[in-house]
Image (cartoon, helix red, strand yellow):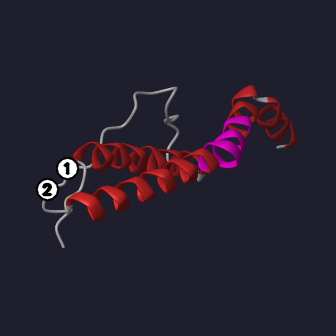
Amino acid sequence: MDELKEKKIKNPDYWVRLLLVLLYFGLVFYLVRALVGIALVLQFVIVALSGKTNHRVVHFTGNLNQFSYHVLQYVTWNTDNRPFPFSDWPGPIDRDSDSFKS
């Protein structure tokens, strides 16, 4: 049993994952938070001036939301699929799908 634990501890995949988890959780979420804040202010100004949302900002924040979801799934061990840049950048959710409607 101890030999099995030792093999697991020495497995480089665990240490790479720990490094990625710390990187994503410690750095990427601060960047995402800043980008969401900028998009929030930008969208507010656009809506205040024009009365309608900017589809590019909506698309960008939709992509950012999906990326954040993928990162959270990875850092909480709900998936082993590494998020961007180790996989494709996720697209936004389908706003017309039944699951999006309230």
Query: Where is mark 2, residue-wise?
Result: 97
Q: Which mark is residue 94?
A: 1
> Which image quadrant is residue 50 in?
bottom left
Residue drawn 30% across the image and 55% down it: 46
Q: Which mark is residue 72?
A: none
Q: Which residues are magenta?
A: 19-29
Q: Callout 1, which amino acid?
A: Asp
Residue drawn 59% across the image and 53% down it: 76
Q: Is residue 40 left or right of residue 48?
A: right
Residue drawn 57% across the image and 50% down it: 34
The reply to whether the C-beta atoms of the residues labelled 1 and 2 are less than 8 Å apart is yes
Residue drawn 52% across the image and 34% down it: 82
Task: Measure how far apart labels 1 and 2 are at the Cα level.
Answer: 6 Å
Q: How many marks?
A: 2
Residue 12 painted magenta: no
**Percent of width and height locating residue 70:** 46, 45
**Percent of width and height locating residue 52:** 19, 59
Q: Callout 2, which amino acid?
A: Ser
**Percent of width and height locating residue 4:** 79, 37
**Percent of width and height locating residue 1:** 82, 43
Magenta-colored segment: predominant secondary structure: helix
Looking at this view, is 29 or 79 the one in front? Answer: 29
